[in-house]
Image (tube, grey):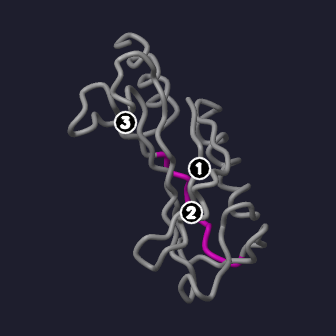
Amino acid sequence: MQKELNTIKTALEAAGCTVTAHSTDENVYAVVVNLGNGWAGDCKGGYWGDCAITDDTLELHFNFGDVWGEGEEIACGEGFVHLTYKGGCDANGLAYTGDLDDAVCAKIAEVTNGVVDAHSSEQGMQGHFDETESYLSLDVSV
């Protein structure tokens, strides 16, 4: 497992991702993918309405490695792109299934040269909690 973890870690770092050892699990790494600037603005929504965000810069955060603690399988945890909805959650629909969701997933593939693959997660419906806990949830694989 360690050899495969190191291979994935090296590929992520070569793609420009920040990879750090998880503080409590030696075979789990925290990954940050910088998605760049220019994100703030209005976005056409999907099933849950249009939204607008104030964040100019976005990042994807996720863990990979032995996330289930079984010592057998390398997996990725849920991906989070933290969002600040303009006017708060009550004034916006969800980013989930909308144009912002599609653009973020495409940008992840672009900036990581295809090393990281991300798609909408049904958990995205939970990322519209309040102004301190709003995010786009993504299923991530490496």
Which quadrant of the view contains residue 115?
top right
Which quadrant of the view contains residue 53?
bottom right
Q: Circles 2 and 3: CB distance less than 8 Å? A: no
Instruction: Kindly state the secondary structure of the residue where label 1 is placed.
Output: strand
Q: Circles 2 and 1: CB distance less than 8 Å? A: no
Q: Is residue 119 above or below residue 101?
A: above
Cα distance, mark 2 to mark 3? 20 Å
Residue at 45% of width from left, 44% of height from top? 62
Q: Where is residue 66 shown, x and y percent of the image? A: 37, 26
Instruction: Determine whether, in the image, residue 96 is placed left or right of residue 127.
Output: right
Q: Amino acid at mark 2?
A: Asn
Quadrant for the N terminus in the image: top left
The residue pinned by badge 3 equals 19
Which quadrant of the view contains residue 24?
top left
Q: Amino acid at mark 3?
A: Val
The residue pinned by badge 1 equals 138
Residue at 66% of width from left, 49% of height from top? 107
Cα distance, mark 1 to mark 3? 18 Å
Q: Amino acid at mark 1?
A: Leu
Q: Main secondary structure of the magenta part?
A: loop
Q: Where is residue 80 shown, x and y percent of the image? A: 49, 54
Query: Looking at the image, which is closer to me, 72 or 15?
Result: 72
The dot on residue 109 is none
Instruction: Kindly state the secondary structure of the residue where label 3 is placed.
Output: strand
Instruction: Kindly state the secondary structure of the residue where label 2 is placed.
Output: loop
Quadrant for the C terminus in the image: top right
The dot on residue 37 is 2
Q: Upstream in the sequence, badge 1 or badge 3?
A: 3
Cα distance, mark 2 to mark 1? 19 Å
Pointer 1 local density, CA inside 10 Å: few below 14, some 14–19, many at least 20: many
